[in-house]
Image (cartoon, rainbow, N blue to C red):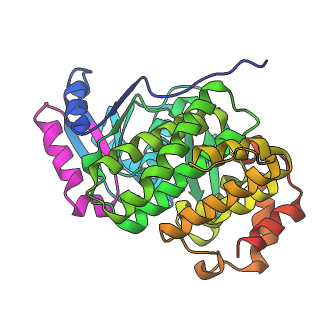
Amino acid sequence: MNTATFYMPSVNLIGTGALAQAVVELSQLGFKHALIVTDQPLVELGYAGDLQQALAKQDIQASIFDQVQANPTTGNVEAGLALLRQKECDFVISLGGGSPHDCAKGIALVASNGGDIRDYEGVDRSAKPQLPLVAINTTAGTASEVTRFCIITDEQTHIKMAIVDKNVTPIMSVNDAELMKNMPKSLTAATGMDALTHAVEAYVSTAANPITDACAIKAISLISQYLTRAVNDGHDMQAREQMAYAQLLAGMAFNNASLGYVHAMAHQLGGFYDLPHGVCNAILLPHVQRFNSQVASDRQTDIAAAMGLDVRGLSAEQGAKLCIDAIVSLAEQVGIPAGLSGLGVQESDFATLATNAMKDACGVTNPIQPSHEQVVAMFKAAM
């Protein structure tokens, strides 16, 4: 058996009131000036200002960088890094979902290692730990607050770079459901399906192990029970808290078992068309799993059972079909678009998208390696 390594932040705070506790703990670590990396909607909601004031009460200064795009870019990283250096910040706080977290990771990594964020595309390309990063989550989906994954779009090539590096793991993650209750339905749905994709891909990954399996299966179970409730009533705090646990568990799973071709393909759609990552994952997930069922039907049957379905007496093939049908049904329930065609995706781009997907680090652990023609076929099926 190969040696398995399990990465996650050393401190993880979760539950109502976690943010207040995190600020107190930060005051004990000796930090002087934070760069808060966030986006404009969270500034408009007052979240960034509230955090800045809470830090000030603990004698920690904070400067706000709020120019993060939905798909963070190399330019975002460069601009944030410039502000960090100008203000002489000694640590970074990301506030938001996957976009601010990933941008903050890029900023913190280059701050300590030098060079350009493009230098770190691939696996473990950095020499030194990034500047300390605290990741405060406001969505229940990406789990970027606990992972060593950083996805940055190269503005020149329009390719999403997958940076998988142990040195971008935050030192602390914070999941406070109070910060999630104002998420709109569409974002709740997209991020929730993103979390489901993480868990499913980790469970069928060639790098899965008993720890990641346990995290993935529990995440799938919780998402199946609580995602629809969270979408329908954002102030259902039980559903919000359980989705926060679910996405964190899914993050723990894929952070260590990695992912597969759903993400390898979704990254290309996001980089090429600037589409929302969670929606792309949700649309692609059943089609990639249908392809994976050639070798992963036993594991997909386990997923069907975790989603609350009765798989007793079914063959592996029947269980896999039940799993895929359940994924499609859940996506429909929460309002995910049925296909890519409505998002402006063009079949004429599939050859290029497939070529780039086959270079994505996330595809390495897919349970079966597709040909270029098969990747194109999966894109077509998802239209």
In percent of width and height, residue 20 lies at 19, 35
Q: Is residue 369 left or right of residue 300?
A: right
Q: Can residue 134 be seen in this view?
A: yes
Foreground residue among 88 and 145: 145
Q: Is residue 228 left or right of residue 359?
A: left
Q: Residue visible at 39% across and 50% down?
A: 80
In percent of width and height, residue 273 lies at 60, 72
Question: Residue 68 in magenta?
Answer: no
Which quarter of the figure is the N terminus placed in? top right
Question: Residue 58 in magenta?
Answer: yes
User: Toward which corner of the image does residue 305 lie, by quadrant?
Assistant: top right
Foreground residue among 239 and 208: 239
Foreground residue among 192 and 125: 192
Q: Is residue 280 visible?
A: no
The boundaries of the magenta stretch are 34-60
Q: Residue visible at 25% across and 35% down?
A: 18
Give the vertical position of 113 relative to 120 (above or below). Answer: above
